[in-house]
Amino acid sequence: MATTDSIASKFSEMSTKRKAGYGLIALLAIMLLIFILNLDFIKGMSRVGAGYGAHIACSCRYIEGRDLQSCEGDMESGMEIVSLSDDPENKRVTASVPFFSSDVAEYREGFGCIVLNEDEREALD
């Protein structure tokens, strides 16, 4: 059975590169664990961000009449990851967070811009 002294001596004999490699592996494992434990939160926030982005961009585009690039400047800080695309024929804006979520907002006369529910989004496809 290994004693504490023998483990410590083996660790001190390891090369610096090997120690750095083990440290990097441990750091990556911790980061992966934190990501996995927060995955539900990340998914939820991406849904909120996509819905918010679609609604704000749709309002900017079809109520204010500005172009989509101008509307991107209206996003809150931290929303840089949300990408926007425009469907001028149907007066829709799609906002998406890569790998996690997307949402569609549509301009409807008399109602303004509304975020489409899941059934309405499926009907678009």
Image (cartoon, grey):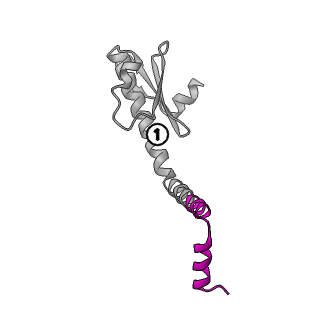
Q: Is residue 80 left or right of residue 19?
A: left
Task: Please state the horizontal and vertical placement of residue 99, each as a whole percent of the image.
Answer: 56, 39
Q: Compared with residue 29, is residue 116 higher up or lower down, i.e. above or below? A: above
Q: Compared with residue 123, is residue 91 higher up or lower down, i.e. above or below? A: above
Q: Compared with residue 10, is residue 72 higher up or lower down, i.e. above or below? A: above
Crowding at label 1, few (<14), some or many (≥20) Cα neighbours within 10 Å?
Answer: some
Front-lying residue, 19 or 93: 19
Dominant secondary structure (helix, strand or loop) of the stretch shown in magenta:
helix
For the point 56% across and 58% down, the residue is 24
Residue sitting at the far right:
1
**Residue 112 showing in the rendered view:** no
Which contiguous range is marked in magenta? 1-26
For the point 40% across and 31% down, the residue is 53
Q: Can residue 7 be found in the magenta stretch? A: yes
Front-lying residue, 41 or 113: 41
Task: Please state the horizontal and vertical placement of residue 65, each as a whole percent of the image.
Answer: 35, 13
For the point 36% across and 27% down, the residue is 56
For the point 58% across and 84% down, the residue is 5
Q: Is residue 125 left or right of residue 87?
A: right
Q: Is residue 31 left or right of residue 111?
A: right
Q: Quadrant of residue 8?
A: bottom right
Report the quarter where the N terminus lies.
Answer: bottom right
Task: Please state the horizontal and vertical placement of residue 35, each as a whole percent of the image.
Answer: 51, 53
Front-lying residue, 109 or 1: 1
Total numbered circles: 1
Element on which disc 1 rests: helix
Mark 1, residue position: 47
Front-lying residue, 7 or 64: 7
Q: Can residue 72 be found in the magenta stretch? A: no
Report the quarter where the C terminus lies.
Answer: top right
